[in-house]
Image (spheres, helix red, strand yellow):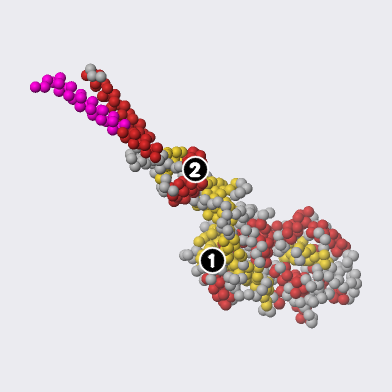
């Protein structure tokens, strides 16, 4: 019969064997891992700041089986694209980041003989956003709304937007071929000064202005109203029904039209207008010469916009300028009367402001022919979106396939040492060496 | 849309008011020959007032010496710079007259040297056609004043466009009549005024 002391010794021996077995298994596992690492480097967990050096190493002396990158803010574009290339070559690439600022920028050339670049910006409303060109900062935006548009009249080919940690950059990809403008209406100060403003801007203008029963004032060639010759038609006063039909066909085929002032009351042009005119509202008297609200001094036919129109400008609560699409073309309607008074009587900058305002209206509707430029330079229009598209969504560092990572190796080693210690202690307490 | 208004410039020196019948005659001609919307009466507007810029066509005349004030000069410069059109006529028909000397001095100081408007300039075809340049006046034909028929008008031209038109043909006397008097004339003598106004409105 076994005594209790014999039973206790048997339990210790069993414990010692289990501890030894555990130690052997841990050792074996560590050996396997070490062997694997000799065959192929395992998982690398790195910070984005180390990437310039590591990417070169990985590309010249062997990449690890898997890479996990931690970043604050978006990656530099070259690192993002290089990681994508590594992933394409078989390296598992994952990433996790914080403080990413989703930002996007798109640029378009402006339909204006003086050039100009229009930029559409998407960025978080709460983050200050800075717009730059190759020379330096152009503007800063904190609009409270997530989108903004910037018009840069100097016409840089490339714009850059910094928003938080993100930098979006975009280049103009097309050149525009502009046609002529056709001015229709009645001889008078409005047609004279609008034509003068747009000619100063560089537009070539044909005009047919009603003057007398003997004939009209004609400038330029008498040509059919079509998009091969004209970018836009400006109707500044009433026109005959046949002319109105021709203008409508021109717009449906892709041309632009601006219907302004008294022309709004021309029955044939109603189909083109973005709104119907109400009763005339007088301007502020004496003529307002402040630069802040330069059109407040003008008389206005307030617009009731059509359902498909977008109001571009208001005077207090009244719609003053509206726009709409008509099949392939675009139409802008302005309710201001006698804008020449602004140019003649406005502030010191009135001539330039009047010219810019009319040029902007025309740019908004003008038909253009686009010619693609050869791709040059670097663009990164939506860095965060591109990061997700190239490397997938952000994720915490995954456990490797064999269940090991630097932490589990340390645990394995600790378990090995603990098992050996338990066995050694137990044997010494039993008096066995 | 505001109609065309014939504005006569009021300046502090001289006799700006010497051609007070001219506006009615020009307005009558515009109404007879064109579809332009025209104010039935002209207006007198001070050169040194902000109101000047409401009337982009400005008529100036007189017999006496002209010396613009600082405010008048500043406004005239700004007026032309912004696209306004000035028609200045010597009511003396006398090349050595005091109005001609002083008015051309003032214009030269403000805008630079006056030059001859070529007889083939589009001014002479803006509405009626004048193949030989500016029409002669009865005063010229009768040998009054300096006893000359002036073949050219003078002007301040920018890229061929007339900003300031200066005449020493004395159209102000030629057009100083009541409009109804035209019915006794074979040719309306103020037809050339239609050319000037149409040119100002369309070029």
On whether disc 1 and disc 2 are found on a single subunit, the reply is yes
**Above or below A73: residue A25:** above
Q: Position of residue A166 (x, y in %)?
A: 50, 45
Vertical position of residue A112 compared to residue B39: above or below: above
Is residue A24 rendered magenta in the image? yes
Q: Which residues are magenta?
A: A1-27
Q: Which residue: 68% across, 62% down? A: A200
**Place of residue A6 in the rendered image (x, y in percent of width and height, measured from the top left):** 15, 21
Q: Given the image, what chain letter belongs to the residue carrying mark 2?
A: A
Say if residue B36 shows up in the picture.
no
Closest to the observer, A214 or A257: A257
Q: Nearer the viewer, residue A373 or A160?
A: A373
Visible residue check, residue A169: yes
Task: Check residue A330 in the rendering and tell me which mark sits there, or answer none.
Answer: 1
Which picture quadrant has residue B59? bottom right
Q: Nearer the viewer, residue A291 or A64?
A: A64
Name the residue carrying label 2: A60
Please give the count of numbered marks on the rendered protein.
2
* Foreground label between 1 and 2: 2
């Amino acid at each position: 019969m076994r005594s209790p002391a014999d039973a206790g010794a048997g339990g210790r021996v069993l414990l010692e064997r289990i501890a030894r077995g555990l130690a052997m298994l841990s050792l074996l596992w560590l050996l396997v891992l070490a062997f694997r690492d000799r065959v192929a480097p395992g998982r690398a967990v790195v910070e984005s700041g180390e990437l310039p050096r590591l990417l070169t190493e990985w590309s010249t002396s062997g990449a690890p089986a898997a890479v996990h990158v931690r970043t604050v803010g978006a990656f530099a574009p070259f690192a993002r694209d290089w990681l994508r290339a590594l992933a394409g070559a078989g390296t598992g690439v994952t990433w996790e980041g914080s403080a990413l600022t989703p930002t996007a920028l798109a640029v378009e050339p402006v339909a204006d003989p003086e050039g100009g670049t229009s930029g559409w910006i998407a960025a978080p409303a709460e983050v200050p956003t800075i717009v730059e060109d190759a020379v330096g900062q152009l503007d800063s935006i904190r609009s409270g709304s997530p989108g903004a548009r910037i018009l840069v009249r100097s016409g840089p080919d490339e714009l850059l937007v910094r928003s938080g940690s993100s930098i979006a950059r975009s280049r103009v990809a097309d050149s525009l071929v502009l046609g002529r403008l056709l001015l229709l209406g009645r001889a008078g100060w409005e047609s004279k000064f609008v034509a003068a403003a747009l000619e100063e801007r560089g537009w070539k203008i044909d005009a047919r202005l009603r003057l007398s029963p003997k004939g009209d004032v004609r400038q330029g060639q008498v040509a059919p109203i079509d998009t091969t010759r004209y970018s836009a038609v400006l109707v500044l006063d009433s026109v005959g029904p046949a002319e109105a039909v021709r203008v409508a066909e021109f717009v449906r085929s892709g041309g632009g039209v601006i219907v302004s002032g008294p022309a709004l009351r021309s029955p044939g042009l109603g189909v083109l207008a973005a709104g119907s005119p109400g009763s005339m509202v007088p301007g502020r008297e004496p003529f307002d010469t402040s630069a802040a609200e330069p059109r407040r001094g003008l008389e206005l036919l307030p617009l009731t916009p059509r359902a498909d129109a977008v109001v571009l400008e208001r005077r207090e609560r009244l719609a003053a300028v509206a726009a709409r699409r008509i099949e392939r073309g675009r139409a802008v309607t302005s309710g201001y009367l006698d804008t020449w008074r602004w140019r003649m009587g406005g502030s010191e900058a009135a001539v330039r402001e009047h010219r810019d305002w009319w040029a902007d209206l025309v740019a908004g509707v003008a038909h253009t022919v686009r010619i693609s430029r050869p791709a040059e330079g670097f663009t990164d229009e939506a860095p965060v979106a591109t990061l997700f598209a190239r490397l997938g969504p952000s994720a915490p560092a995954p456990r490797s396939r064999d269940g090991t990572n630097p932490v589990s190796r340390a645990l394995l080693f600790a378990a090995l040492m603990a098992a050996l210690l338990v066995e050694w202690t137990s044997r010494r307490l039993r008096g066995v060496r | 849309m505001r109609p065309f208004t014939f504005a006569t410039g009021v300046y502090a020196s001289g006799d700006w008011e010497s051609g007070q019948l001219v506006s009615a005659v020009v307005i009558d001609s515009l109404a007879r020959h064109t579809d332009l919307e025209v104010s039935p009466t002209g207006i007198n507007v001070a050169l040194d007032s902000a109101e000047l810029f409401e009337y982009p066509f400005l008529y100036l005349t007189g017999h006496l010496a002209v010396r613009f004030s600082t405010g008048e000069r500043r406004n005239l410069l700004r007026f032309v710079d912004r696209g306004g059109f000035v028609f200045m006529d010597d009511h003396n028909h006398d090349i050595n007259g005091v109005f001609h000397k002083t008015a051309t001095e003032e214009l030269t100081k403000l805008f630079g040297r006056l030059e001859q408007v070529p007889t083939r300039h589009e001014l002479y075809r803006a509405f009626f056609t004048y193949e030989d340049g500016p029409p002669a006046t009865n005063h010229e034909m009768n040998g009054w004043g300096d006893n000359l028929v002036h073949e050219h008008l003078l002007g301040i031209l920018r890229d061929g466009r007339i900003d300031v038109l200066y005449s020493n043909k004395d159209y102000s006397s030629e057009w100083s009549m009541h409009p109804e008097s035209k019915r006794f004339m074979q040719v309306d003598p103020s037809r050339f005024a239609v050319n000037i106004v149409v040119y100002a409105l369309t070029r």
